[in-house]
Image (cartoon, rainbow, N blue to C red):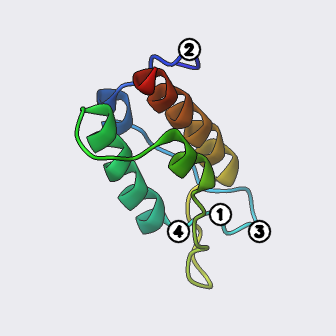
Amino acid sequence: MGDGGLTAENLRGITFEKPPWPKRGYDEKSVNDFLALAVRRLDGRGHLAAADVRAVRFNKPKLGKRGYDERQVDDLIDEIAAAIAHLDG
């Protein structure tokens, strides 16, 4: 999907692994909320720009919790930024 071909439908079905122990990863709700914005943008609604995507930062989950694997989320963020940049021409 690294060719700018990422779609809203791809994002709707995305899953992430837990980070390797003992890392905490990214807070799941923060990532999910952001992905909802990205889905809207890829559906042709919303106003999220590629620069907004590149600038996003996620919280850590609460102590004792493990969120999403940071590397997987960061890789997807790069793909989302490329897809939105492609939409913007």
Q: Name the residue under label 3.
A: 22
Q: What element carries label 4?
A: loop
Q: Report the mark closest to the observer, 1 or 2.
A: 2
Q: What residue type is labelled 4?
A: Asp
Distance from Cα at disc 1 to Cα at disc 2:
26 Å
Distance from Cα at disc 4 to Cα at disc 3:
15 Å
Using a 10 Å C-alpha cutoff, classify the residue at mark 1 as few (fewer than 14 neighbours), some (14 to 19) or many (20 or more). many
Q: Mark 1 points at which residue?
A: 25
Q: Which amino acid does label 1 sit on?
A: Gly
Left or right? Give the position of 1 relative to 54: left
Using a 10 Å C-alpha cutoff, classify the residue at mark 4 as few (fewer than 14 neighbours), some (14 to 19) or many (20 or more). some
Residue shown at 41%/38% (left/top)?
Answer: 14
Q: Name the residue under label 4.
A: 27
Q: Is mark 2 on a helix, strand or loop?
A: loop
Distance from Cα at disc 1 to Cα at disc 4:
7 Å
Q: What residue type is labelled 3?
A: Pro
Residue 16 % position (x, y): 52, 46
Q: Mark 2 points at which residue?
A: 3
